[in-house]
Each structure stands twice: as C-alpha cells, then as structure tokens.
Image (cartoon, rainbow, N blue to C red):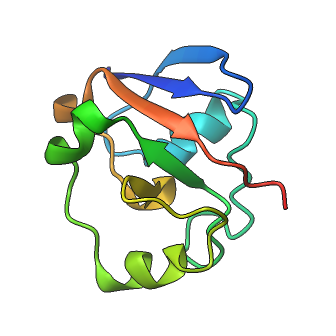
Amino acid sequence: MPKITYVATDGIRHEVEVENGYSVMEGAINNDIDGIVAECGGACACATCHSYIDEAWLEKMPEMDDMEDSMLDAAFERKPNSRLTCQIEVSDNLDGLIVHVAENDY
C-alpha cells in the first residue's frame, strides 16, 4: 500500500498507508488525521478537505478538473499547490506523497 505523509497545521507529520483506490481524503479520515474535515463526504461540494500538495509532488498529481478548481475558490487561503484531497485517488504512483493540511476548521 502507498504511504502518504499528512503534515498537520501544527507541523506534526503522520505517515500512514492508504489503500489503492481510496481518495487522499479517505486516507486521512480512516487514519484520524486532524484538519481534514470533509463535511460533504467527498462529493467535491465543500472544500473542507483542502490541502497543499508538497512542491516535489505537483508534477505527479492528476489533473484538476473544472469542478475542483471552482470549489477551491471557496477554500481559505488557496495557493498554487492547493487541492481538494477528495479528488485525488491513491495509487502506487503516489507512494511517498506529502500533503500539508490547510486550515479547514473555519
């Protein structure tokens, strides 16, 4: 299983294994990672799973679709490396991914 490192807003790193086919958001929820709120349950309808993808991984990310791009406009402090973790499917290609959790408790 691919390992994903979630870096919480307080800087604490959580390295967890996430099953292929799950979303990065589901990996966070299933492993009790604080900060990924996921109010809509992964329907790309709330931006509370907003995170920042580590710069080293940006080139390896799947393309962002228009719906995700639009929903990110509602996210707090959107940056060029912002993504909704509900829209990123885990695969072996993402083994070692580093995700910095955004401030989602607003």
Q: State the quadrant of the N terminus.
A: top left
Query: Which of 65/53 is in front?
Result: 53
Q: Position of residue 101 (x, y in %)?
A: 60, 40
Residue at (51, 73) in percent of width and height: 72
Query: Which of 89/58 is in front?
Result: 58
Q: Is residue 4 left or right of residue 102?
A: left
In terms of image quadrants, where is residue 41?
bottom right
Q: Is residue 93 left or right of residue 106?
A: left
Q: Position of residue 14 (x, y in %)?
A: 59, 16
Q: Is residue 93 left or right of residue 8?
A: left
In terms of image quadrants, where is residue 38?
bottom right
Q: State the quadrant of the C terminus.
A: bottom right
Q: Position of residue 16 (x, y in %)?
A: 50, 18
Residue at (42, 75) in percent of width and height: 68
Query: Which of 78/96 is in front?
Result: 78
Q: Position of residue 79 (x, y in %)?
A: 46, 59
Q: How many marks?
A: 0
Residue at (32, 41) in percent of width and height: 90
Query: Which of 90/12 is in front?
Result: 12
